[in-house]
Image (cartoon, rainbow, N blue to C red):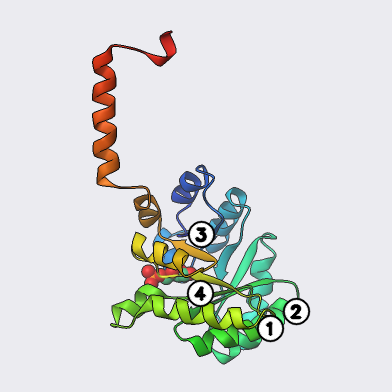
Amino acid sequence: MKFFVDTADIDEIRDLAATGLLDGVTTNPSLVAKTGRDFFEVLNDICAVVDGPVSAEVAATDVDAMVTEGRKLAEIADNITVKVPLIWDGLKACRALTQAGVLVNVTLCFSPSQAVLAAKAGASFVSPFVGRLDDISHDGMELIEDIRTIYDNYPNFTTEILVASVRHPGHVVEAARLGADICTIPPDVLRLLAKHPLTDRGLETFLNDWQSTGQSILKT
Ligand code: E4P
């Protein structure tokens, strides 16, 4: 399973990229707005740090403008992935950009039927938002299960399932269990994946016991 980080904060991205665990980045207009920085500067900084796909979202909603914006974003770096919303014009833009050799992430997917359309439009990635479905008392992970089942029925669908709107480590574990290709994870949730109270308690005990031996591994 690949891990993308869901942020436009370059400091967080640098820190997490240094672990070698990061396969890509997703941004969206809200995440960019949160930085208070220029969109193109942010994307240039991210692409200088991360080799994998970096999602940058269009702001237009009609097909021609989306394609024009998408082409401009794609000029930033080879690993830019143009994000388009899952609306009819977004699907048409996805088809046009894909045919022009641009990676496309179809975002704001909330149903299996939408995911089928994204695959048929040739998207490189489809982003189902699990957390936002959970927020309205739907089961976000059920959508992932449905999309996985459907895509596996059709080997000519090459679209990767990019689980988005991840809110806690349980979402990541469940996505992995269901065979999702990628999770895009907020930085704090990514760090939480390594946490377990028994790990902390066990380490504390080991270190105390080691100290009581008076030995040093480097001084023998
Ligand atoms: C995905 O690409 C989106 O940026 C993101 O996962 C949305 O998550 P949210 O529902 O926490 O805003």
Which quarter holds ligand 1? bottom left
The circle on residue 99 is 2
**Residue 175 is drawn in which quadrant?**
bottom left
Would residue 32 be seen by someone viewing this image from the given angle?
A: no
- Residue at the spot of label 3: 4
* In this picture, residue 96 sits left or right of residue 193: right
Amino acid type at mark 3: Phe
Alpha carbons under labels 2 and 4: distance apart: 20 Å
CA separation in Å, label 1 and label 2: 6 Å
- The numbered disc on residue 127 is 4
State which tag comes first along the sequence, 3 or 2. Answer: 3
Report the amino acid beneath label 2: Gln
The one nearer the camera, 118 or 202, is 202
Say what amino acid the circle numbered 4 marks. Ser
- In the image, residue 161 above or below residue 195: below
Mark 1–mark 3 Cα distance, whole angstroms, equals 24 Å
Distance from Cα at disc 4 to Cα at disc 3: 12 Å
Q: Quadrant of the C terminus?
A: top left
- Name the residue located 49 percent from the left edge and 86 percent from the top edge: 112
Q: Which mark is residue 169?
A: none
- Determine the secondary structure under disc 4: strand
Q: Quadrant of residue 173?
A: bottom left
| Contact flag, marks 1 and 2 (Cβ < 8 Å) | yes
Mark in front: 1 vs 4: 4
First of labels 4, 3 by sequence position? 3
Q: Which residue is mark 1?
A: 95
Q: Amino acid at mark 1?
A: Arg
Q: Which circle's residue, 2 or 4, is located before the other in the chain?
A: 2
Is the residue at mark 4 in contact range of ligand 1, meaning its CB lies under 8 Å from it?
A: yes
- Locate residue 97 relative to residue 48 in the image: left or right: right
